[in-house]
Image: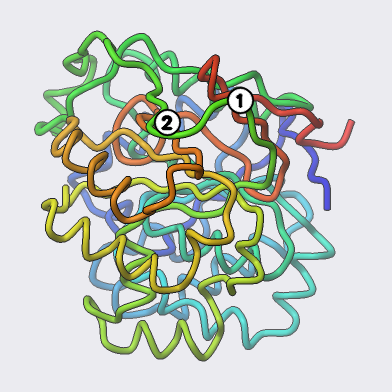
Amino acid sequence: MKLKHLNKGDKVAIVSLSSGILGEDFVKHEVELGIKRLKEFGVEPVFMPNALKGIAYVKEHPEARAEDLKLAFKDDQISAIICAIGGDDTYRTIPFLLEDEEFKQSVLQHPKIFLGFSDSTINHFMFYKLGLPTFYGQALLPDIAELDKEMLPYSKAAFLNLFHETFQPVQSSPIWYLERHDFSPAAIGTPKESVKENKGYEVLQGKGSIEGIVLGGCLDSMYDLLSGTRYPDELEISLQYQVFPSIEDWKNKILLLETSEEQATPEVYKKMLCALKETGIFKVIQGILHGKPMDEKYYKEYQDILIQAVDNPSLPILFNINIGHSTPRCILPLQSKIKVDLDNKIISFPEPIFEG
């Protein structure tokens, strides 16, 4: 299935599929900034009916979150869907979506760009199941509504890929940024603290190049799906609706991994990787792309644990990708072919991502 790229004048739906923070007064200035930036890109943001109802309402009403997604797919005027932010209980929308035959049909009949990261990993897995190519790496509040005078340049260039038939090759950003702690109106126009990138993409294993389809996302969200540690019913829902892709689905895929803002300790990171390993995934994939940990916390520890967990020196691993919870962020198309050149540390796209 091929999608159409964004064009000026297109409408873009904003959805809160997990956290309802978008509707709180303390982020109004960020919402206004996000609206302004989207309009500068030439697209018209459309907030779905429940997207701005706040943390408590959105938390208590997964059916309302699901309804917003359904409405966005039904609307022929909407070309893309952008998640407000991540969260931690997106899984609760799954029964309302996968038990709705009309929704599943509308995804196939009215395919649209879907962009999100973090706990939106659950949505990406759902859409993989339904056959819709999606895009991993950015969201409204953390990227488009960046409090600096403009979007972070690397992130902005990545977002602009959605307006072209194919994506520009992805390489390491020359700088990365420490996470903000002040998101108040007083922070508007203030730059994030930047750090010169002195490592670039790091090849932990492998050489040459690999081509394939990327599948994956936030390791923390995958672990929650597999273990039910955070919410006991998450594992039940995951099994009932087969949210986590089967071992057959993972064959020859390139696994995308990145870690959340919770900055898991090495012990927890190892536990999460072990849960992933138990699925048999490392035996069937053809490579791993791993994002830069936020603020580079546990950077070297994660590398060592990852190599130990994979326990296969022939499996290529490219580490320190600008994706996930560390800024700036690229966007990677899921269900589209990519080429990972390990020797030159570059990710490219051998086929057009969108219809001409």
Residue 34 in sight from this viewpoint: no
Disc 2: CA contacts within 10 A as few (<14), some (14-19) or many (>=20): many
Relative to 131, is 221 on the left or the right?
left
| The quadrant where residue 291 appears | top left
Residue position marked by numbered label 2 in the rendering: 144
Residue position marked by numbered label 1 in the rendering: 208
| The quadrant where residue 183 appears | top left
| The quadrant where residue 300 appears | top left
> How many numbered marks, from 0 up?
2
Note whether 235 is above or below 66 in the view shown: below
Q: Position of residue 142 (x, y in %)?
A: 33, 37
Disc 1: CA contacts within 10 A as few (<14), some (14-19) or many (>=20): few
Q: Position of residue 18 (x, y in %)?
A: 37, 64
Relative to 340, is 51 on the left or the right?
left
Q: Amino acid at mark 1?
A: Gly
Q: Position of residue 43 (x, y in %)?
A: 63, 31
User: Looking at the image, which is closer to me, 209 or 150?
Assistant: 209
What is the image's colouring?
A: rainbow
User: Looking at the image, which is closer to me, 199 or 60?
Assistant: 199
Query: Helix, strand, or loop for circle 1?
Result: loop
Report the residue at 62% width, 81% height from top. Answer: 98
Query: Helix, strand, or loop for circle 2?
Result: helix
Report the residue at 47% width, 39% height from top. Answer: 289
Q: Residue furthest right?
A: 356
Q: CA distance from mark 1 to mark 2?
A: 35 Å
Q: Position of residue 263 (x, y in %)?
A: 16, 47
Report the residue at 32% width, 45% height from top. Answer: 307
Report the residue at 33% width, 70% height from top. Answer: 275
Foreground label between 1 and 2: 1
